[in-house]
């Protein structure tokens, strides 16, 4: 394709005048002697770049040493990890191990990260992957505060807490109340609760019931995980859940500003189909799409919190649960019909509305939260579902609908009153006005966009700068790599009157689904662990931290305790003598405080590799099953004598 260049355009004029300037003895842009402008034009020609390519490059290029304006935290999908990406450069800054071991961080290879991953095992089953979908940044007053990020696992219902002071996963919680989830994680505007909602109904508490008892015994639930902002941990004992009918609850979002106290959740399959293709039933996909509408669940979580505090709960699988009947009696749950097979549910920045996209519809629907709340307050209902949940009138509950295109999914917002909806089947981002519900512009994405994320997009004050389209299919966008193709993140500039596609970024780890984009300045990560001996998993100086000069080996009842330090360029002790069958407890502290002076400690044959950032302490316990000589060494090229930073674990035969 020939790039289109018009010589009179502002960019070309600017480049030509730059060329003239430098050619006339002005400053020289490089050592070649040619003017910068002339070089740029030649480069454009040589690489067949259009002017819009060059403006896109100028908007994303981040010179060496310069930092990005935003962090994006993208779900790692099947990878079970978080991907930290700088915007607008789209440079990957870090992978954070969450549900999955991450070798570089040593997460799950010997240190306290193993215990965090173990918190996520369910029913005695080891689980070392996750289907991560929705990261949620912690908020204060509806603004991202840059302190924590929460993530979910759809397959094995779990929620993780990642601390943004050191970018380390500190906790995983999981409740056997539910058997799968999807509406997670979403936070209330002051991060009092992290919300996790089931997806595929099952008997509550992980028990068995035949699928023929779907209507009677199968249920959904929304869990409100209580978050302790001082400790930075979820407190399961202070958490509670609400039982829901056996529809497939989908995504959720919390009210904000005037609608703080509400949470909204979509549902699909209000038909309560459950498949059974070989048993004479329609497949789930057709059984579940018979009704013209499904139910938007409107939940008054402040009321629910009070009901739980009053003890009107039943404990199921350790989770205090408000029964469906209690939820109805207490008037804290109501339904509004929503267009066929809805997916995204997104509360507007001003908190007045909630946008729902119907996957099999051509509209986005903007619900009116004040009207919904008023009808619930007045008990103005038009009917009940089979479980007795009150239903509101659709027309009396909306601002209106926007004719948007086929397959609207998710919606994000800017600072100018516009909404941006991903339209899956049409494979575009549609920009529309919340005021008059009219489409302003569409931009193609490549291909089949799922979620999209906007700068500060889920807050009460979005930035309206950048948007990333998270595309499911990449087809021909990148050099081929076999049949499993990367996902495609496309960076789009939404600051001007017209959207501009800036950059394609392949994501080769899993299907990320959603992400969060936050102003870089809001994060204040630590540079080193301070004071020396900090255990990242307790946020305290570890009682077993090793002080320089006090290194030692002690044989105790429970095994051999090795108190070790790491410092450029040795471990001390560097010879560890044990016996076959011994349990070894390594207490290793990096006693350095210089930024980036990270060591690693890997031991041959033991599947142990820990990362020792400056000041960090690790406790590593393992059993030496076999006699032999096992070299250990530092895995970070920390100094000129890094290769010499090594030692021996000598395991004598019994
Ligand atoms: S879901 Cu994947 S594109 Cu899990 Cu939020 Cu919509
Ligand atoms: Cu320490 Cu290499």
Image (spheres, grey):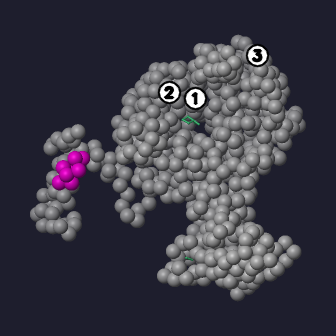
Q: Earlier in the sequence, mark 1 or mark 2?
A: 1
* Residue designated by label 2: 408
Let me know if residue 46 is in the magenta part: yes
Q: Earlier in the sequence, mark 2 or mark 3?
A: 3
Q: Secondary structure at mark 2?
A: strand
The residue depicted at 73 percent of the width and 82 percent of the height is 577
232 or 617, which is in the foreground? 617
The residue depicted at 87 percent of the width and 75 percent of the height is 557
**Residue 117 visible in the picture:** yes
Dividing the picture into quadrants, the one containing residue 260 is top right
Question: Within 8 Å of ligand 1, the CB of disc 1?
Answer: yes
Disc 1, disc 2: CB below 8 Å? yes
Residue 189 screen position, x and y as percent: 65, 42
- Label 1 to label 2, Cα distance in Å? 8 Å
**Residue 306 visible in the picture:** no
Vertical order, 13 against 435 (above or below): below
3 or 626, which is in the foreground? 626
Dividing the picture into quadrants, the one containing residue 201 is top right
Vertical order, 316 against 292 (above or below): below
Describe residue 596's horizontal placement relative to residue 531 as left or right.
left
Let me know if residue 454 is in the magenta part: no
* Residue designated by label 3: 386
- Label 2 to label 3, Cα distance in Å? 29 Å
Q: Secondary structure at mark 3?
A: loop
First to last magenta residue range:
42-49
Describe residue 562's horizontal placement relative to residue 76 as left or right.
right
Q: Earlier in the sequence, mark 3 or mark 1?
A: 1
The residue depicted at 47 percent of the width and 30 percent of the height is 424
Residue 463's disc number: none
């Amino acid at each position: 394709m020939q790039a289109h260049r018009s010589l009179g355009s502002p960019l070309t004029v600017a480049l030509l005048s730059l060329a003239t300037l430098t050619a006339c003895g002005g400053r020289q842009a490089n050592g070649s002697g040619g003017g910068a402008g002339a070089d740029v034009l030649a480069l454009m020609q040589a690489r067949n770049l259009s002017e819009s390519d060059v403006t896109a490059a100028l908007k994303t290029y981040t010179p060496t040493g310069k930092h990005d304006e935003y962090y994006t935290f993208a779900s790692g999908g099947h990878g079970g990890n978080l991907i930290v990406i700088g915007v607008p450069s789209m440079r990957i800054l870090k992978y954070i191990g969450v549900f999955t071991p991450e070798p570089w961080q040593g997460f799950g290879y010997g240190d306290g990260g193993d215990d965090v991953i173990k918190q996520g095992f369910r029913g005695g089953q080891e689980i070392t992957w996750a289907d991560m979908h929705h990261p949620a940044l912690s908020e204060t007053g509806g603004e991202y505060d840059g302190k924590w990020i929460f993530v979910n696992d759809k397959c094995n219902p779990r929620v993780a807490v990642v601390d943004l002071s050191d970018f380390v996963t500190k906790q995983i919680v999981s409740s056997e109340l539910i058997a799968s989830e999807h509406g997670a994680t979403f936070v209330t505007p002051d991060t009092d609760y992290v919300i996790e909602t089931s997806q595929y109904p099952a008997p509550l508490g992980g028990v068995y019931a035949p699928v023929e008892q779907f209507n009677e015994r199968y249920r959904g639930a929304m869990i409100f995980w209580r978050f302790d902002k001082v400790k930075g941990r979820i407190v399961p004992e202070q958490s509670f859940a609400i039982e829901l009918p056996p529809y497939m609850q989908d995504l959720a979002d919390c009210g904000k500003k005037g609608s703080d106290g509400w949470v909204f959740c979509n549902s699909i399959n209000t038909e309560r189909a459950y498949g059974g293709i070989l048993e004479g039933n329609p497949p789930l996909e057709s059984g579940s799409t018979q009704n013209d509408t499904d139910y938007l669940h409107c939940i008054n979580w402040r009321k629910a919190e009070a009901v739980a505090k009053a003890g009107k709960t039943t404990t199921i699988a350790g989770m205090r649960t408000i029964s469906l009947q209690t939820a109805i009696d207490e008037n804290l749950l109501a339904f509004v019909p929503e267009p066929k097979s809805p997916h995204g549910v997104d509360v507007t920045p001003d908190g007045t509305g909630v946008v729902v996209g119907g996957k099999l519809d051509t509209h986005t629907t903007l619900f009116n939260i004040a009207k919904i709340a008023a009808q619930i307050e007045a008990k103005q209902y038009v009917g009940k579902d089979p479980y007795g949940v009150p239903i509101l009138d659709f027309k009396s509950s909306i601002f209106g609908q926007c004719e948007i295109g086929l397959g609207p999914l998710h919606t994000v917002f800017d600072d100018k009153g516009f909404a941006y909806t991903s339209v899956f089947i049409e494979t575009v981002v549609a920009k529309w006005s919340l005021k008059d519900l009219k489409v302003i512009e569409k931009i193609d994405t490549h291909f089949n966009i799922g979620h999209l994320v906007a700068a500060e997009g889920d807050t009460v004050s979005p930035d309206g700068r950048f948007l990333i389209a998270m595309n499911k299919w990449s087809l021909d966008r990148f050099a081929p790599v076999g049949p499993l193709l990367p996902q495609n993140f496309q960076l789009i500039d939404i600051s001007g009157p017209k959207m501009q596609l800036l950059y394609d970024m392949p994501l080769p780890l899993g299907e990320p689904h959603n992400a969060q984009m936050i102003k870089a300045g809001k994060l204040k990560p630590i540079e080193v662990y301070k004071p020396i001996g900090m255990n990242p998993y307790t946020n305290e100086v570890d009682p077993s931290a090793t002080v320089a000069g006090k290194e030692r080996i002690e044989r105790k009842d429970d095994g051999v305790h090795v108190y070790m330090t790491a410092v450029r360029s040795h471990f001390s002790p560097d010879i560890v003598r044990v016996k076959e069958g011994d349990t070894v407890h390594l207490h290793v502290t990096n006693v350095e405080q210089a930024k980036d002076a990270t060591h690693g400690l890997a031991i041959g044959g033991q599947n142990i590799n820990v990362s020792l950032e400056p000041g960090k302490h690790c406790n590593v316990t393992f059993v030496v099953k076999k006699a032999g000589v096992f070299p250990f060494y530092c895995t970070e090229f920390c100094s000129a004598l890094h290769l010499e930073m090594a030692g021996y674990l000598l395991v004598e035969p019994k």
